[in-house]
Amino acid sequence: MESTPEKTELEFSIKPHEVMSYEAVEKLNPFLSEQKKILSRRNTGLSPKQQKEVTKAIKTSRILTLNEFIVTK
């Protein structure tokens, strides 16, 4: 009987001193769920400072319409 992990962990790559920019939409997309909600620190494994930077960048990109607020079908 093989043991399979209950949930798969996503790969989130942020270097410790990397500054997240709202313009890098491709880098921000892994931090959004399928419903375009911002993933929590528990899921991403980021430090509090990194999570605040990612959240601020995502919210700024949403306001500038670079990223969607909701999923459109």
Image (cartoon, helix red, strand yellow):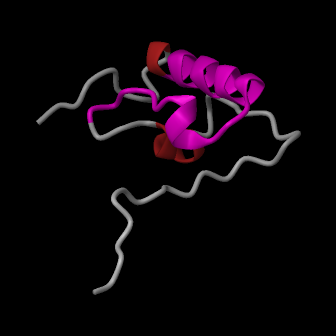
The overriding secondary structure of the stretch rendered in magenta is: helix
Left or right of 71, for residue 31: right
Give the residue at the far left of this rendering.
73
In this rendering, the answer to whether 42 lies above or below 13 is above
Q: Kindly tell me whether residue 43 is visible in this rendering.
A: yes
Residue 49 percent across, percent down from the top left: 76, 23
Give the residue at the far front of this rendering.
1
Along the line of sight, which residue is nearer the eye, 56 or 23?
A: 56
Q: Which residue is pictured at 62% across the width and 40% down the height?
A: 24
Q: Which residue is pictured at 88% across the width and 39% down the height?
A: 17
Magenta stretch, residue numbers? 35-61
Query: The C terminus lies in which quarter of the figure?
Result: top left
Give the residue at the far top of this rendering.
63
Along the line of sight, which residue is nearer the eye, 65 or 21?
A: 21
Query: The N terminus lies in which quarter of the figure?
Result: bottom left
In this rendering, the answer to whether 64 lies above or below 37 is above
Residue 23 percent across, percent down from the top left: 62, 33
Q: Is residue 40 magenta?
A: yes
Q: Which residue is pictured at 32% across the width and 84% down the height?
A: 2
Left or right of 1, for residue 54: right
Residue 18 percent across, percent down from the top left: 82, 40
Q: Quadrant of residue 33?
A: top left
Q: Kindly tell me whether residue 28 is visible in this rendering.
A: no
Left or right of 31, for residue 8: left
Residue 39 percent across, percent down from the top left: 46, 32
Q: Which residue is pictured at 72% across the width and 24% down the height?
A: 48
Give the residue at the far bottom of this rendering.
1
Left or right of 11, for residue 5: left
Q: Quadrant of residue 41?
A: top right
Along the line of sight, which residue is nearer the eye, 71 or 33?
A: 33
